[in-house]
Image: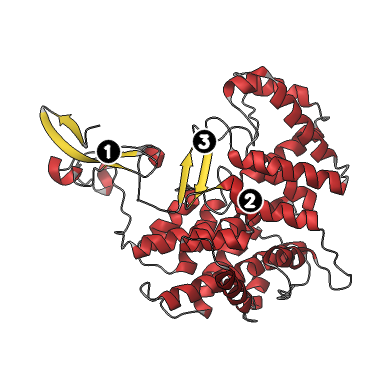
Amino acid sequence: MSDIAKLVINGQEYEFPVKVGTENEIAIDIKSLRAATNGVITIDSGFKNTGSCESKITFLDGEKGILRHRGYAIEDLTKKAGFLEVAYLVIFGELPTKEQFSKWEADIKRHSLLNEEMKNIIDGFPKKAHPMGMLSSLTSALTAFNPATVDINSEEQVYGAITTLMGKFPVIAAWAHSKNQGLPLNYANNSMGYIENIMQLMFRIPTEPYEMNPIAVKALDELLILHEDHEQNCSTSTVRIVGSSEAGLFASVSGGVSALWGRLHGGANQAVLEMLKDIQDDGGDVEKYINKAKDKNDPFRLMGFGHRVYKNFDPRARIIKNAADELFADLGTNDPVLEIAKHLEEVALSDPYFAEKKLYPNVDFYSGIIYRALGFPVEMFTVMCAIGRLPGWIAQWKEMRLNHEPIGRPRQLYTGEPLRAFKEFDER
């Protein structure tokens, strides 16, 4: 294959280097395009064909249904490692040794206590504020309690910022949940593991004993691993572009939280449950909605089926489906919304239309129904996705800063009015 790409504009030929990734991905390097062509740019709405960076963190092949972190298959990571192990891998590049993991876990726990003044900020929110809005604000507020600038070239300072955020983020998320539900604010219990701590932070009531369900813990652990990183999606790109201005880690991650909030991104699992509730309110006729989804003239769309990147199947969905089945069997749930979800899944997987269109249930479909089964209100679904995605955001910010990437500054094609003479008031 030629290592040069040629572009002809108005009869003039220009050459640009071609780069090849470790998985034989091909990219045309056009960083000199504007300078070489005296102002010509490319247009790529949504950046679907534009590589914004080179990264060593995650490899994703949507056509083949492949997801790997630092070279490790997602199937192996969910089966053989826990959330904090995978987080260490994603952030630092290698799986931790026993000694490294013990220190990693202990350092994160050491930072799990929030400054009591954070309660003043929580008190300022109305009870019905969305937890994602609170999570974004409180993450940004960490900067006020940790004002020192982090030297990106200091491993000690970067490690300190990372463990601080890993320790405090789940507590902030739980406090947003408690505020929204009108419940007391819980503190971390450092005798517990990371996932167990999340469960007790979210659900422990001071007046009652809290019993930990190991199958629920396992399901949540796998689900959070599946969300740790997913290449250059909307929120990850946001973290990188905010960080490219040399904004700190907390401010950059706060931007990622806001980006994740959207219905087309992290909010997709919430949209799944809202759709299932609508089907229930309409009598629970799943076949009716299957037919609506197949009718090209009907605006209804099945949420949680198909994927923007995965054109065959979502490998994460295959993994978490097993966890969902195991959890439902253990809980023996008779939730009518979850029954509709299982019925919808069965019908869709057996219908040739969905197979031909490759509209398989994706990770958002299963994550939404798992979060409901675990007892999370729908407003918390995206917050849980943010907890899972946190290590990926940290890794991407760290990589971008260490690579000394330039500040993000996309171009545009102006389509407005040409130069016009100014009109005085009496001429308008």
Q: Position of residue 354 (x, y in %)?
A: 64, 23
Q: Do the residues labelled 2 and 1 touch (CB within 8 Å)?
A: no
Residue 177 shows which numbered tag?
none
Q: Which numbered mark, 2 or 1, is in the foreground of this view? A: 2
Q: Where is residue 314 in the image (x, y as percent from the top left)?
A: 58, 37
Q: In which quarter of the image is residue 333?
A: top right
Q: Are marks 3 and 2 in contact (CB under 8 Å)?
A: no
The residue tagged 3 is 308
| Residue ID at (44%, 81%) | 148
The residue tagged 1 is 42
The alpha-carbon separation of the residues under discs 3 and 1 comes to: 22 Å
* Other residues around mark 1 within 10 Å, as few (<14) / some (14–19) / many (≥20): few
Whether 66 is drawn above or below 114: the answer is: above
Indicate which disc, 3 or 2, sits on the residue closer to the N terminus. Answer: 2
Nearer to the camera, 216 or 144:
216
* Other residues around mark 2 within 10 Å, as few (<14) / some (14–19) / many (≥20): many
Indicate which disc, 2 or 1, sits on the residue closer to the N terminus. Answer: 1
| Image quadrant in which the N terminus is located | top left
Taking the image as shown, residue 398 lies to the left or right of residue 187, namely left
Which type of secondary structure does the marked residue at label 3 adopt? loop
